[in-house]
Image (spheres, rainbow, N blue to C red):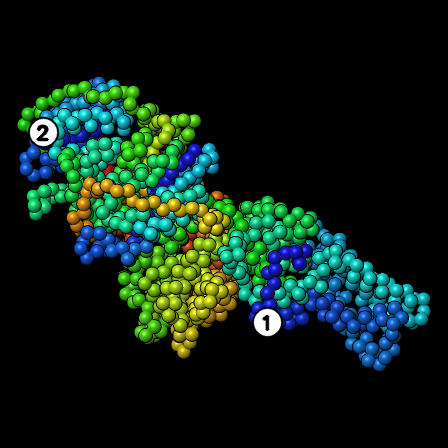
Amino acid sequence: MIADAPNTFSTADLGARTYRFLADVLGQRQTLRERPLPGLAHALVFWGFVAFGLYTTVEYLKGLGIVDLTHTRWFAAYRILLTPFAIGVLVGIVGLALRRAVIRPVGLGQTVSIESLVIAGFIATLMITFLLAWRLDEASLAGQVNWWVHALVILAFLALIPASKHFHLVLSPVTVFLKSPELGNVPNLDFEKEQVGLEAVKDLGSKTVLDAFTCVECGRCQVNCPAWGAGKALNPKTLILQTQDALLARKPDTKLVDLYSDEVLWQCTTCGACENQCPVGIEHLPLIIGARRGLVSNGEAPDYLGGVYNHLERRGNIWGLGSDQRQKFVHASGLETFDPRVHDVLVWLGCAGAFEADFQRSLRALFDILRGRGVKFGVLAKERCTGDSAKRTGNEYLFQELAHQNIEDLRAAGPKTIVASCPHCVKTIGNDYRKFGYEVEIVHSAAFVEALTRGDQSVAGNPRERVTYHDPCYLGRYAGTFDEPRALLTRFGAEVTEPTRNRDNPYCCGAGGGLLFADKDEEPGSRISDVRFRQLQETGAGTIVTACPFCTIMLKGAQSSAAAVGGAGEIQFVDLMTFANGRLSKVG
Amino acid sequence: MILVVAEQRGGTLNRASWETIAAAQHIPGGVPIVVAVLGGSGGATTAAAQLAAAAVHEVVAVEHPSLEPYTADGFTAALQSLIGQLNPTSVLFPHTYQTRDFVPKLAARLDRALLTDVTGTKPSDDGALVFVRPMFQGKLTADVRPQGPAPHLVTFQIGSYRPDAAARGSSPAPVKTVAATLDGASVRQRPDQPYQEARQAVDLSQAERIVSVGRGIKGQEHLSVAQALADALKAELAASRPICDAGWLPMERQVGSSGQTVAPKLYVALGISGAIQHLVGMKGSNVIVAINKDPDAPIFEVADYGIVGDLFEVVPALVKALNE
Amino acid sequence: MNIAVCIKQVPTRDWQPRVNDGGTWIRDRDVTFETNEPDAYALEEALRLKEKHGGSVVACSVGPERVAQVLREALARGADRAIHVEHASVEASDAFVIAGALAAAVRDERFDLVLTGLQSDDQGFAQTGVVLAERLGFAHATIIMEVQIESSTVRVKRELEGGWFQWVAMPLPAVLTIQSGINHLRYATLKGIMAAKKKEIRKVAMPAGLAARQHIVRLYAPQKVKRTELITGSPAEAAKTLVTRLRETARVI
């Protein structure tokens, strides 16, 4: 099946892949990360399996009468060393079985998997027979029975593996190695090769096919998915299992939209939580965005996106507003056109910067800070949207049109460093434009200003102001920039109260993936933004600090809706740059 | 002679007809003005009687059963023959939806110049008249000269002249009723009666005037304040997302990216701060009025007229001023 | 149902107006161009009619080399082929010249319907479609909000002023000028763009003997710029001032 699929395997960036392989497979980092206890149990089992590999081999060599190494001295030592591993495996597997059968967390599905319990029983039996072998005379009947039970269970286990999700024992190391080092890496389409995205099961790439059979159904993707969390139909785990079923059913012409449903495909915010939390290296975004591309290429995008595409095509921004408004802002803020001989950095305004009042305030704060520190900066004479919403919604043609035009302008301007306050612009220019050969250092203003003010004395008042910080997905999760905003906040007098879901695993505001305009048919209160706003409210902080224009728009919208029914409390919004600048000017 | 073609329906004059008469009177040189009005039997004569108040040379009611209701073919044929008889130097029309429908055809048939959407006239150095019209969506203005032989046809933008600027005569102008030269069988368009869309269906996108409320209205019980203004303006009531989310107004009254996109002549925003999702839904409005307590509200950026103040004080005052 | 759609290429709506040195036309070199918006709706309507009744859609435009861009976009959206009347001097072309050129280009094709936008974003004559109808000898109707085909006749919903509408029937062939917002525009799809590369754009020379009936003496920026007028005073005073402004300056009530 993998051989039949279009090849999407890549081993580019071997260093990053090797590091991740060591950390996630051998170190069990991903397994431990989110669920420390079950993760530890799994790690004990895994490490036990690795440790037992040689033991099993030696026993089989003996059993098959090839060579008997069991009486060598090193084997005796090895057996002793294995004992703690065996106990670990036993403890781990009993814990995992109890979790699955008794605790039954939601991510594992509604029914208890009998197969999983059988496997757990097998593993437990293997360990018990291993430990019993210490007490039993090898030659006695009990000893013989014990040996045979052990050997037969291993055979049964090996037979069961390929037909079950425990195939991940074999596949996941490969899948983890083959997973792109870049989160949400959806390679650009090659129009010369008439690529139009994924339309049917037969279009699924080899990595996606591998992913489908690697899934262990642990449900991390599900419980971390903001759409699922807000009660929507999308469940990333279901997507992968549906893919597996469709591949096994051998119906290559089944349309992906029929397989997953239109509704589900357009509910993804591309926040990356599923892919980032997956312990076995599954990449959901190439599948979801690939299927979206297939729809968009046939003119089957949702209506609201049709409008956004026309705005992008005709006006170069998602709002459909005229560029004279950007001019007005550039003029009113006294911005100069970037010239590499004069300016240190280029500030990329972004389509929100050009048109959205809150974000313009944020940018003005950034300008103040930069000017106060003597950083010389300029802007492009003309900007178009980076194409983020086109890219994430699968309108690859439009994305590439915008990207090529922007790259041309950026190349002509020639900045070495770009500062942007929109995490989506950072991702798109930093990662997606790079694939067209445009290399530039692009930094989010949070990181840039943090570095710029690192020598500053703390201006903490007494008591410190209690704020909560909402990590934008494209900043915290994608760019790994989560310490810098907190450092800035602390430096300038805040006490940060963490909301649930933070740092590199935030809960999305609901705007990503082109969903900014998708709320037309959504039931008020059930929007992703409503859920996130409540999470932030629950911190009890008086201020929500944001660092992305779209998060601000969505969360403020949720606040307005909550306020209209009296549920918004007294919480206020401040963006990070305004916060920092306000405190900076206080110290003079 | 300048021929002004007035517009009527069922005997009721379109006010823009007076504006065009004012435009004709504004042209220097004291050229005599003849006003023509077309219609079926009765309607044109009724309208002509009203037009006789204007300080013009003559009013001609052109009647034919095939001229009521209006059709492009009928009007083109009737005016072609009337222009042939009167031989004017220029023919002026209001730039209405009706003239946009047939005047280009008339000009093409006569093979004479047609200047549309003209906002004014001015004499040039050589004494010939230059017409002023917007271009590039009003971003630029052009002084334009018609080319080729007279008569030149001109349509005047509504509102370029004031209807009450049309000079009235000391005595009524003579009114003449003539039968149009027109073969009814040559009319290809078969119009139904004009109608307005059913009232119960809210279609904000078709509304001429909209009063829209935002969170500044504070509570559902205060909606009557906005409703009173909507009534006084004959406007539809609309709202921003939070109001509809809260269920104070039905979803179909929501303006913005997640609701309707509207472009009325007048948009009055009450207590709406102007979040970008709202702005993209109403930025195409002709005239925007914002009333808000917060002087920094982004809505003022797009407004033509703004009042910084408490809507609960300003709106009742506005209703009072409108009813005076 | 064979439909011609006449499309004009105009400066983008966010273009910053710049006049040439002679003050007679815009400075072309600073301009990026796009499909005139009402024409985009006309194309969409034509494509929908074709999807419903079968037939073909042919996109037509008059202008210099760059006009091929909007024709390619029309082909990408689903037009079957295109006709490009090559004409260098757009500034000297009024509706008579453009309509004359279009009439010559489509006359022999026996179209059932010719659609175009109700007016252009550049010169804004609101004449071309109607003049074209007269030149072709077709019936016509303008400012159309809905189109229904009934065998050899077409029924259209015309927009009148003040929220009024009217259904008008007429025999085919006919020319209709389409109002913006009659439908939802589709976007160009990747498949459409790929297919467009294989479609034909037929180039036609400008017919001789077309003379413009108007001449731009001077083009300039209007004096008034839109500014927010903040009205101050007590609520009663402010309300009075506002009502006066709305009645007498803006004339919207």
| Residue appearing at x 43%, y 60% in the figure | A403
Residue C185 image label = none
Query: Looking at the rendering, which quadrant does residue C205 occupy?
Result: top left
Q: Is residue B54 above or below residue C69?
A: above
Nearer the observer, C147 or B234: C147
Q: For the residue carrying disc 1, how many other residues have a C-alpha within 10 Å: few (<14), some (14-19), or many (20+)?
A: few
Quadrant the C terminus of chain C occupies: top left
Pointer 1 residue: A14
x then y, percent, for residue C11: 30, 51
| Residue appearing at x 45%, y 58% in the figure | A400
Q: Chain of mark 1?
A: A
Q: For the residue carrying disc 2, how many other residues have a C-alpha within 10 Å: few (<14), some (14-19), or many (20+)?
A: many
The residue under label 1 is which amino acid type? Leu
Quadrant the N terminus of chain C occupies: top left
The residue under label 2 is which amino acid type? Val
x then y, percent, for residue C155: 38, 28
x then y, percent, for residue B220: 39, 41
Q: Is residue C126 above or below residue A136?
A: above
x then y, percent, for residue B33: 10, 31
* SS at mark 1 in the image: helix
Nearer the observer, B151 or A103: B151
Pointer 2 residue: B56
Q: Are marks 1 and 2 in contact (CB under 8 Å)?
A: no
| Residue appearing at x 31%, y 74% in the figure | A342
* SS at mark 2 in the image: loop
| Residue appearing at x 42%, y 30% in the figure | C149
